[in-house]
Image (cartoon, rainbow, N blue to C red):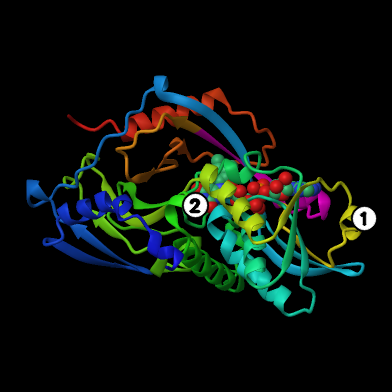
Amino acid sequence: MPESALAAPDIVAPARRRLLQAALGSAALLALPGCVTRIAAPSAAAARLQLPRLQVDPALVIREVAGLRPFRPTGFRVEPERLGEKLVIHNYGHGGCGVTLSWGTAELALELALAQPQRRAAVLGCGAVGLATARLLQDHGFDVTLYARELPPDTVSNIAGAQWGPSALTDRELRTPEFGARLARASRFAHRRFQLLPDQRYGIRWMPLYFVSKKPGFEPGWEWAQTPELFRTRTHAPGTHPFAGRYLHEIQTMIIEPTIYLPAMIDAVRLAGGRVVVRGFAHLDEVAALPEPLVFNCTGLGARDLFGDASMLPIKGQLTVLAPQPEIDYATIAGRYYMFPRRDGIQLGGTHERNVWSTEPDPALSAQILEGQRKVFDWPA
Ligand SMILES: Cc1cc2nc3c(=O)[nH]c(=O)nc-3n(C[C@H](O)[C@H](O)[C@H](O)COP(=O)(O)OP(=O)(O)OC[C@H]3O[C@@H](n4cnc5c(N)ncnc54)[C@H](O)[C@@H]3O)c2cc1C
């Protein structure tokens, strides 16, 4: 049986039920660049979108965490470079979407690897990017040893939200059509690849994501606009759902649970014959002395010091996590605040602090996050 056939239908059923409850019959079509949006008219009470309300209460907070997005202003780097006798293939700089794009940039890195004869590889880094790279290499016959200073649960990938969608990847003024095309390839490959993983074992769950907005039209960010077919949208007009006076722009998204996904990926690497070695590299000489002729650099923000990429910088992000509320089977983004429900808690976040290196959560930001969400879910009785 193909792995994808193991998908548990009960996970998607509530969302599908809600889709059917919504007012499709009275939908109007609104054409927008790169996407098609349906707007459900507020005609019949029976057509209302039924959503359970998120409980936002400081007493429900179970943890506050912060992590550093490995941001590279021109976007991820997937590129070969000679290091003495070795070939290094870089794969880092994924900003706010390293979980999302992990399989996609791994595919770009694999293409470079297949073009040369070596089949014995060292992968540096055991976050989402290193793990996807290792697995894809193994699937193509490479013998892989994974080296990392930190393993899950101590990587940035463990802090991720982790909703599937490219964002916070580039600086606006540095975007190019060439990079947009590479991003599109990586996005399509990764989107498909996540769907091929058994959802329960890897902690992947489909659900609706609602953008709560004052505007009737959905304006996707540049990263999403590269692959509009992955973000098909429909819009629920004010009055057809509980968010008073707002439009809800709905897409279908995947939420990936790092506490399940990353250990499952390590297991898969080992099951395929890979070795995982805890080791930090302080200098390139140490990398050059590795026994493997081929090296994949998936060190995220670590590439700044190890490979001297001074363009790498952190974008700090903070999460306030509420106790799990299993009835919440949808995600929201309202302005800068997002809510991603997971089995290990309700992830509330959306902060971006550029060039901040501290991983200490800021209590003032936590209070802002909670207050922002309290307003979003302050539905009329
Ligand atoms: C608050 C927050 C929310 C986020 N939300 C999302 C989201 O919703 N969706 C999404 O897709 N992404 C999200 N991200 C971004 C995502 O977490 C990162 O892009 C991703 O984790 C980067 O993965 P990585 O494997 O490149 O790096 P990491 O996870 O940082 O892994 C790097 C690995 O390299 C190793 N390493 C580094 N330097 C060395 C060295 N010198 N020697 C040996 N090993 C080394 C580390 O120990 C580690 O194993 C979020 C990030 C934050 C902080």
Looking at the image, which is closer to me, 372 or 108? Answer: 108
* Percent coordinates x, y for residue 346 in the rendering: 42, 36
Residue 366 appears anywhere in the view: yes
Whether residue 8 sits left or right of residue 369 in the image: it is left
Q: Secondary structure at mark 2?
A: helix
First reached walking from the N terminus: tag 2 or tag 1:
2
* Percent coordinates x, y for residue 115 in the rendering: 73, 80
Disc 2 designates what residue?
A: 202
Q: Residues within 10 Å of mark 1 (few under 14, many from 20)?
A: few
Q: Residues within 10 Å of mark 2 (few under 14, many from 20)?
A: some
Disc 1 designates what residue?
A: 285
Q: Is mark 1 within 8 Å of ligand 1?
A: no
Image quarter where the C terminus lies is top left
Q: Is residue 335 above or below residue 379?
A: below
Q: Amino acid at mark 1?
A: Asp
Tell me which residue sits at (42%, 64%) in the image: 4
Q: Amino acid at mark 2?
A: Tyr
Q: Is residue 351 above or below residue 190?
A: above
Image quarter where the N terminus lies is bottom left
Magenta span covers which residues? 300-319
Whether residue 300 sits left or right of residue 40 in the image: it is right
